[in-house]
Image: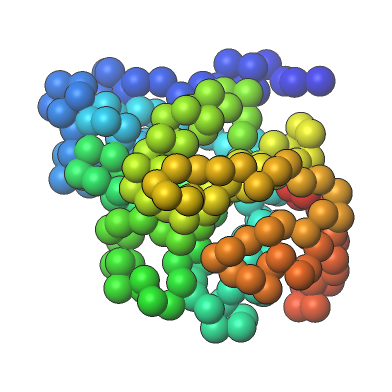
């Protein structure tokens, strides 16, 4: 059963925040915001306030991060980053994916404070308040920025949809559950390791979406 905070936590325009008019926010405006403990993103120049992640959301992020760490960082393919970490897709689109992967050939896009350009893989953990945003606005933003892979995880159904960019458009590779292996093109080793397999490093049982 959903708790009351989970029912009402949604992505909202941050209209009360002082700054440029909505529709005109840029990364520089965003970077000048004081740290007030909230999580913000910019979508098409509109400053948005994201709900604080709940426990189930944080559990999912942790398990995906551990799994990707083992199959990306440990084997030397690239880096894994977690929110809050800014990704500037364009000047008017600044997002904080729940989990992202940057392969070695694109590490030049990383700065100490943010990423400039498209990651190789992004994962968003859906909640009742972010499902539409993840499925529509972020889908469009990641597709137009040419992010090669986008995973949408649903903790309620313990499933992950894998989207692969082909000819400038996302194509679903299917919805995966339980011990299904995820067909990643970004990190080929992931495809051969079911997400229910025990991590050799952390001995943690991972399930879709964890």
Q: In the picture provided, is 126 more to the left or to the right than 78?
A: right
Residue pushed farthest front?
Answer: 167
**202 or 151, which lies in front?**
151
Q: In the picture provided, is 93 more to the left or to the right than 4?
A: left
Identity of the residue drawn at 71% across and 65% down: 191
Determine the image quadrant of residue 117.
Answer: bottom left
Q: In the picture provided, is 20 more to the left or to the right than 147?
A: left
**184 or 127, which lies in front?**
184
Q: Position of residue 179 (x, y in %)?
A: 86, 55
**175 or 195, which lies in front?**
175
Q: Position of residue 17 (x, y in %)?
A: 25, 24
Q: Position of residue 170 (x, y in %)?
A: 50, 43
Residue 110 shows in the view: yes
**In the displayed structure, would residue 179 be above or below residue 172?**
below
Identity of the residue drawn at 19% across and 33% down: 25
Identity of the residue drawn at 76% across and 70% down: 192
Residue 95 shows in the view: no
Q: Position of residue 87 (x, y in %)?
A: 35, 52
**208 or 26, which lies in front?**
208
**In the displayed structure, would residue 64 be above or below residue 89?**
below
For the N terminus, the quadrant is top right
Identity of the residue drawn at 16% across and 45% down: 28
**In the displayed structure, would residue 71 be above or below residue 146?**
below
Determine the image quadrant of residue 74.
Answer: bottom right
């Amino acid at each position: 059963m959903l708790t009351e905070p989970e029912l009402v936590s949604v992505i909202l325009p941050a209209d009360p925040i002082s700054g440029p008019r909505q529709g005109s926010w840029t990364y520089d405006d965003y970077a000048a915001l004081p740290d007030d403990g909230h999580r913000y993103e910019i979508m098409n120049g509109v400053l948005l306030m994201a709900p604080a992640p709940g426990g189930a959301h944080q559990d999912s992020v942790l398990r995906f991060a551990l799994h990707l760490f083992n199959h990306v960082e440990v084997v030397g393919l690239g880096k894994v980053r977690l929110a809050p970490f800014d990704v500037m897709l364009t000047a008017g689109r600044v997002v904080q994916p729940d989990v992202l992967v940057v392969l070695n050939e694109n590490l030049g896009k990383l700065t100490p404070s943010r990423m400039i350009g498209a990651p190789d893989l992004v994962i968003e953990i859906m909640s009742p308040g972010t499902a539409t945003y993840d499925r529509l606005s972020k889908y469009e933003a990641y597709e137009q920025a040419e992010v090669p892979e986008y995973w949408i995880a649903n903790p309620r159904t313990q499933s992950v949809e894998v989207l692969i960019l082909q000819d400038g458009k996302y194509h679903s590779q299917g919805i995966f559950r339980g011990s299904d292996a995820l067909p990643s093109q970004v990190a080929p080793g992931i495809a051969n390791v079911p997400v229910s397999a025990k991590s050799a490093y952390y001995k943690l049982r991972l399930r879709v979406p964890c």
